[in-house]
Image (cartoon, grey):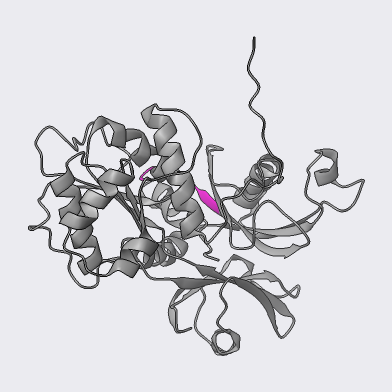
């Protein structure tokens, strides 16, 4: 399963800050049993007490902010364990539902960290995955708790806050590829290796009013949102403030260059059959997204498919979802957006989209 922890959007908050605030990075580096967030999840906190992201279900964040203040004061990174299995623990007092243990590393960010995290941000923006390496348990003499290293998808070092030397070379040599996360030892020190995936790229073709909540919700998920529409009255920047990019072009004019981050999910909602067909053909030729949504009933889908000149019937059957979305009820643009994103989210994360408690719901009407 994809390890999408919204690093891209969280790093965007941090890197765009031009104030004199100090910043700290809190990372889930270790886990035993069940927890709300998995290893690799991050939270960023500044010296104003503002925090972005979550390392739990919202229960531990206040204590993380408290610990961050100490890190700012003494300049030393700290590793905190929250054992939710112990009845008399701090976490248990909060009534947290999970029964596991998580370890959170809190690091004060310096200019060296900003350089490394800027490279991480640029790598994710290019649609590439990489690995974040952090030492979280060390001998008393170690000074590595506040260091971070960044590896590319092949395990080669991209950047590091640590001074290059024998220990660092041994660390890089000791890392192994992982689809998610692992911890390992180098001498007496224990390290966390987290795979950081690029954010999902979600493209919306059609910039009408009904696309606005879709763009907003997708952006809140940490996805990179692009809205495409050549028509003058559509896709206005004032209406799509959450979109990272607005493209004003026709299907035949859009140059999807090599090396560009792939489109993971796309939604066709131009409300124009010909335009939807042209954009569908464009997607098949240039990007091949995992998910394609198409507004309208089955009859309209058939007409769009007939007009798009795509002969790959297997691709059309596997990737194109029309009618789009899950049956959630509701007809407002916000309800439709929720329905679309629920289905798209399930597809991108390779999830079933089924009701988790497996109960049958009975509609109850008030008489």
Residue interval drawn in magenta: 18-24
Left or right position of 100 against 339: right
Is 133 drawn above or below residue 80 in the view shown? below
- Quarter holding the N terminus is bottom right
Q: Nearer the viewer, residue 350 or 273?
A: 273
Q: Can residue 231 be seen from the camera position used here?
A: yes
The image quarter in which residue 158 lies: bottom left
Q: Main secondary structure of the magenta part?
A: loop
The image quarter in which residue 88 lies: top right
- Quarter holding the C terminus is top right
Name the residue at the right extreme. Answer: 88
Q: Residue at x 80, y 45 (%)?
A: 91
Q: Position of residue 362 (x, y in %)?
A: 67, 30
Q: Nearer the viewer, residue 96 or 187?
A: 96
Left or right position of 309 against 116: left
Is 344 drawn above or below residue 207 in the view shown? below
Q: Nearer the viewer, residue 104 or 296?
A: 296
Q: Position of residue 4 (x, y in %)?
A: 50, 59
Q: Can residue 268 be seen from the camera position used here?
A: no
Q: Residue at x 19, y 56 (%)?
A: 306
Give yes or no for residue 19 being in the magenta stretch: yes
């Amino acid at each position: 399963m994809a390890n999408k922890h919204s690093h891209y959007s969280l790093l965007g908050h941090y890197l765009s800050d031009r104030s004199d605030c100090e910043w700290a990075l809190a990372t889930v580096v270790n886990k035993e049993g069940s927890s709300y967030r998995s290893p690799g999840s991050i939270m960023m906190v500044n010296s104003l007490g503002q925090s972005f992201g979550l390392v739990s279900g919202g229960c531990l964040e206040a204590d993380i902010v408290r610990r961050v203040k100490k890190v700012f004061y003494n300049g030393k990174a700290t590793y905190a364990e929250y054992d939710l299995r112990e009845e008399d623990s701090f976490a248990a007092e909060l009534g947290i539902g999970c029964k596991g243990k998580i370890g959170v590393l809190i690091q004060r960010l310096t200019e060296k960290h900003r350089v490394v995290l800027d490279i991480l941000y640029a790598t994710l923006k290019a649609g590439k995955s990489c690995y974040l390496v952090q030492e979280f348990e060390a001998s008393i003499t170690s000074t590595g708790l506040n260091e971070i290293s960044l590896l590319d998808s092949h395990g080669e070092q991209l950047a590091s806050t640590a001074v290059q030397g024998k220990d660092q070379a041994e660390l890089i040599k000791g890392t192994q590829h992982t689809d998610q996360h692992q911890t390992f030892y180098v001498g007496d020190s224990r390290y966390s290796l987290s795979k950081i995936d690029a954010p999902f790229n979600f493209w919306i073709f059609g910039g009408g009013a009904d696309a606005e909540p879709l763009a907003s919700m997708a952006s809140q998920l940490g996805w990179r949102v692009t809205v495409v529409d050549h028509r003058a009255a559509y896709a206005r920047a004032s209406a799509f403030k959450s979109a990272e990019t607005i493209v004003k072009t026709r299907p035949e004019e859009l140059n999807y260059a090599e090396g560009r981050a792939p489109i993971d999910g796309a939604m066709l909602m131009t409300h124009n059959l010909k335009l939807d067909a042209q954009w569908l053909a464009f997607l098949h030729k240039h990007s091949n997204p995992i998910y394609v949504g198409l507004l309208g009933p089955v009859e309209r889908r058939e007409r769009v498919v007939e007009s798009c000149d795509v002969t790959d019937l297997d691709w059309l059957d596997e990737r194109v979802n029309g009618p789009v979305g899950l049956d959630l009820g509701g007809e407002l643009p916000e309800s439709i957006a929720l329905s679309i994103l629920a289905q798209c989210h399930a597809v991108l994360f390779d999830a079933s989209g089924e009701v988790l408690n497996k109960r049958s719901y009975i509609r109850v009407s008030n008489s």
